[in-house]
Image (cartoon, helix red, strand yellow):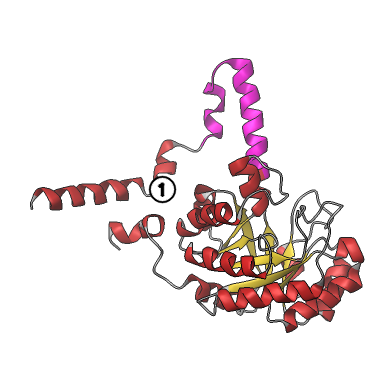
């Protein structure tokens, strides 16, 4: 593999069909974990540690890039751009949060096209109204399921690659109850959604019953400090969930580590006692393919100097 091939995912659009790779993963019959990345370097770590795909959390991007709470303040263009940096930095597929599509059906149409152009392999849309709220907070408001069906239809019409994954997130469990969430999920499957993402189920029994009543491919959200109890990937596999998201695990660990280290730095006036907690420069450069960039630069400079 040449230097330009190694770094093409960062410099250019990655050449391989990542949506097709994602479809193969989902159809493999296995359950896999999708850790959330909040920037490109965290996505590279996720890939290096052997995960087959990566998730781009809307909360992670809103919190980490703009310092906003997860209430829909990032625009579609901003989110697509940030998700694109993440998607193109790795060779594995990336699925991104697209909130409620950032508007009506016509806005969903553009959102799907923007996400696909940025190199994402799929996205999920939720049936919340504007302004949206974090899925595990109270006070959510829902759109009519017929309205969500229109958005799903727009998403399917907009995509260029038939393997680009359209996921419908159902937020009604915490608002209208479990039965309504099941009914909505089946409506969304009938409308063409390829996966269903039931948000904020509260017990293992609810996850099990939801899987019995909703026949499509399912995603579970294993966020921390929310309404959902902690279940393992193997437990979700036994319940027939294909993907388990860990959207903010890395982000929350980062925040705790940064907070602790800043307190040490403020108290000691030196970072010396923190060195053993840091990623060494050489490891960072290896993760970023630093030498490959240098070699490519030298090769290009030599080519141009000989003209």
Check residue 265 for magenta coloring.
Answer: yes
Can you give x and y, in whole percent of width and height, for residue 15 in the image? 39, 68
Membership of 125 in magenta stretch: no
Q: Secondary structure at mark 1?
A: loop
- Residue 61 position within the rendered picture, expressed as x and y whole percent measured from the top left: 61, 49
User: Can you give x and y, in whole percent of width and height, for residue 96 in the image?
Assistant: 60, 61
Type of secondary structure dominating the magenta stretch: helix
The answer to which quarter of the image holds residue 205 is: bottom right
Q: Give the quadrant of residue 140.
A: bottom right
Q: Is residue 9 left or right of residue 31?
A: left
Residue drawn at x 82%, y 70% is: 144
The N terminus - image quarter = bottom left
Instruction: Tell me which residue sits at (40%, 55%) in the image.
Output: 10
Q: Residue at x 67, y 36 (%)?
A: 256
Task: State whether residue 6 is above or below residue 17.
Answer: above
Which residues make up the magenta segment?
Answer: 252-278
Residue 150 seen by the camera? yes
The answer to whether residue 123 is above or below residue 194 is: above
Give the mark count.
1
In this rendered view, identify the residue nearer to me: 212 or 199.
Answer: 199
- Label 1 crowding class (10 Å Cα cut-off): few <14, some 14-19, many 20+? some
Residue at (75, 77) in percent of width and height: 188
Q: Which residue is mark 1?
A: 288
């Amino acid at each position: 593999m040449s230097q330009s091939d190694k770094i093409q995912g960062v410099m250019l659009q990655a050449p391989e069909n990542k949506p097709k790779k994602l479809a193969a993963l989902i159809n493999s019959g296995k359950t896999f974990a999708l850790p959330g990345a909040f920037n490109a370097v965290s996505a590279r770590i996720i890939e290096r540690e052997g995960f087959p795909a990566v998730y781009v959390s809307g909360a992670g991007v809103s919190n980490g890039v703009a310092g906003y709470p997860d209430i829909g303040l990032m625009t579609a263009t901003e989110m697509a751009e940030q998700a694109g940096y993440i998607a193109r930095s790795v060779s594995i597929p990336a699925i991104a949060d697209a909130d409620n599509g950032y508007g009506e059906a016509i806005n969903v149409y553009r959102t799907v096209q923007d996400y696909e152009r940025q190199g994402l392999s799929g996205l999920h849309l939720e049936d919340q109204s504007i302004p949206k709220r974090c899925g595990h907070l109270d006070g959510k408001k829902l759109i009519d399921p017929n309205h969500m069906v229109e958005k799903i239809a727009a998403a399917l019409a907009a995509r260029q690659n038939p393997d680009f994954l359209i996921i419908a997130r159902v937020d009604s469990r915490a608002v209208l109850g479990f039965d309504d969430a099941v009914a909505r999920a089946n409506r969304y499957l009938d409308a063409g959604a390829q996966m269903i993402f039931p948000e904020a189920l509260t017990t293992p029994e609810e996850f099990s019953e939801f899987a019995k009543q909703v026949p499509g491919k399912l995603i579970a959200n294993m966020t921390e400090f929310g309404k959902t109890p902690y279940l393992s990937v193997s437990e979700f596999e036994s319940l027939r969930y294909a993907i388990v998201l860990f959207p903010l695990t890395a982000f929350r660990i980062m925040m705790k580590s940064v907070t602790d280290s800043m307190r040490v730095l403020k108290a000691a006036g030196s970072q010396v006692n923190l060195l053993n907690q840091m990623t060494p420069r050489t490891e960072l450069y290896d993760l970023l393919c630093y030498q490959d960039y240098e070699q490519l630069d030298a090769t290009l400079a030599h080519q141009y100097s000989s003209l």
